[in-house]
Amino acid sequence: MEIILKKEVPNLGFKDDLLEVKNGYARNYLIPKGLAILATESEKKILSENLKQKSFKEEKIVSDLNTIAEDIQKLNLKIYAKVTDNSNKLFGSVTSLNLSDTLDDLGHKLDKKYISIIGGTIKSLGKYSAKIRLHREVKFNINFEVLKEK
């Protein structure tokens, strides 16, 4: 079923994206919650007109976000976590919230919903990657290291 998103939906898309999803997902979740509408021909025409008007503003936003993405990729991120006795296992885990807090400390305020750690939560020391999605056109990976807290 073809739908148009009315709001951002994590792991699916951003507002005004035209997507193909399973019928049940659209009928039982997205449309009743007001997150999407059915993509009829008239709605598609309205969407294309709206997107034409937004495209000029969006070019500036995308260039600014690309600059921010380049700055973040240059960072050497280190996250310090508590470790259980004499092992590399963490006491707890490192999540996208910890990564968001570390970026915030370095001057890049970024909500955890835009960060997705590749492989899920982290439970041991080592080097890892995360995917960051600032905009539908601005996606990038960053590498970081989880170290023992001093």
Image: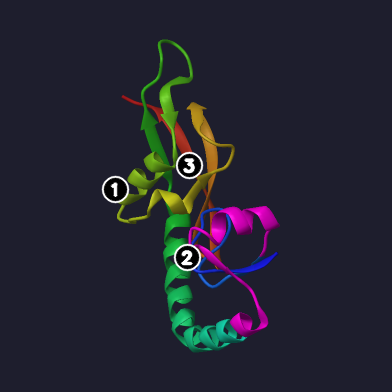
> Which residue is painted at 54% across and 65% down in the image?
36
Q: Is residue 31 above or below residue 88?
A: below
Rendered position, 147 above or below 88: below
Give percent across and percent down for residue 76.
43, 47
Q: CA distance from mark 3 to mark 2?
A: 31 Å
Kind of residue sitting beneath label 3:
Phe
Q: Please determine whether, in this image, residue 128 is positioned above or below residue 8.
A: above
Q: What amino acid is labelled 1 in the image?
A: Asp
Up-down relation of residue 91 to residue 67 (above or below): above
The magenta stretch spans residue 31: yes
Q: Position of residue 105 (x, y in %)?
A: 29, 48
Foreground disc of the pair 3, 2:
2
Q: Which residue bears the numbered disc 2?
A: 7
Q: Which residue is mark 1?
A: 105
Residue visible at 56% across and 85% down?
Answer: 46
Q: Which mark is in front, 2 or 1?
A: 2
Instruction: Provide the residue span drawn in magenta.
Output: 20-44
Residue type pointed to by label 2: Lys
Q: Pick the quarter of the image with the N terminus.
A: bottom right
**Regarding mark 1 in the picture, which secondary structure is present there?**
helix
90 vs 24, left or right, is left
The answer to whether marks 2 and 1 mark residues whose Cβ atoms lie closer than 8 Å is no
First in sequence: mark 2 vs mark 1: 2
Looking at the rendering, which quadrant does residue 37 occupy? Answer: bottom right
Q: Which residue is mark 3?
A: 144
Disc 2, SS: loop
